[in-house]
Image (tube, helix red, strand yellow):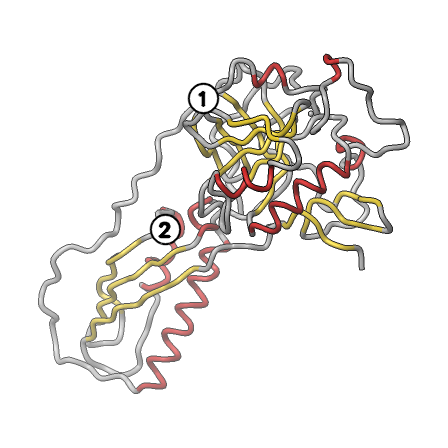
Amino acid sequence: MRALLACLALVAACAPAPLADESTTGAEAPSPEAPTVESLFLHVDEERPCLLVARDGAYTAGRPLETAVRPRPPFPEGLRAHLTPPPGGFVLYTLYGRFGAGELSLTAVTRHAPPIGPVFALLLAGDGAYLGKPHEDLEGPFDRHALPGALASIGIAEDALVAVVPRAHTSADELAEALALLDALGAEPVLALPLPPETRHRAVAPDATSGGTCGAAPALEGEPGEPAPHELREVVARFSAAAAECRKGTASYEAARGGALELRVRVGGDGTVGDVCVERDSIGDVALRDCALRAAREIRFESAGALELRVPLRFKRDERDRARGLCASP
């Protein structure tokens, strides 16, 4: 369940990098036999719930490259152009939308679960690793010995989404080492690439979310009803199934993130719904809410009598695309 970005960025040539010196410093490039990040992700033999698959002392990619930005930027030769001067924060574009704020523009190029926690950036640059938060200057460089402590001190933990930015010749071993550190912290990694500094985006105003909300409730009309417990359970079960179908029909970040939706349903003396409205909505997806309201209006009770029901619906986070950094080959 994803929403395409509200903008399409026009991408020119750009650049990424490993925990060794950049090519501009005179360091040797990896040998032709050594797999690099760029070569690994050209082909995915079997899709797995992780970015890299350890197999007989080597690595293969576990996820295909996918991005909401067209065309997808190339794996850059280095990251120096994106780190000088140090950018004040970063923006990450994903299939769920835009997250963060700052001068460095990144695009996720693998799938991930809808973010519910903070977003971070981990850039594997030539002189070490750099860490970033939205709105803040990047920190670094950190060598491989200092990186574990830096990841923990910046606040990376469970529910965090970390945009891991390599360069074209970052070695598979180096990427695997960084991903293993994120796995140990419980964070979710997503492979990301930098966009050109001149990238611009078009902001879209958010949808209004107040339609269908409850106001003051007039008194119930007619004799109060008392449905049998089994009938109430059956009606609520049918409505819950209809609400689940509503979620399948919407493709927004808000719906994928999940939350609670509570409806107030008033049933007339003939068993049909006379009024339905939203008491509480922590999701904020207009299409999901409107569909749930329509489904509630289809509720029917066989027993007569006026009723007022509070129907709470909880939607779990869609974690089907959640990825780990590393997994072992079966």
Q: Which mark is residue 283?
A: 2
**Please, which residue is most extreme toward the right here?**
33
Is 325 situated above or below 100? below
Residue 112 occupies quadrant: top right
> Is 80 on the left or on the right of 103, as rendered?
right
Secondary structure beneath disc 2?
loop
Rendered-image quadrant of the C terminus: bottom right
Q: Amino acid at mark 2?
A: Ile
Is 98 situated above or below 84? below
Give the residue at mark 1. Answer: 88
For the residue carrying disc 2, how many other residues have a C-alpha within 10 Å: few (<14), some (14-19), or many (20+)?
A: many
Determine whether label 2 and label 1 are within 8 Å by CB. Answer: no
List x then y, in percent, for residue 183: 62, 50
> Is 15 on the left or on the right of 46, as rendered?
left
Answer yes or no: is residue 16 visible. no
**Please, which residue is most extreme toward the front here?**
145
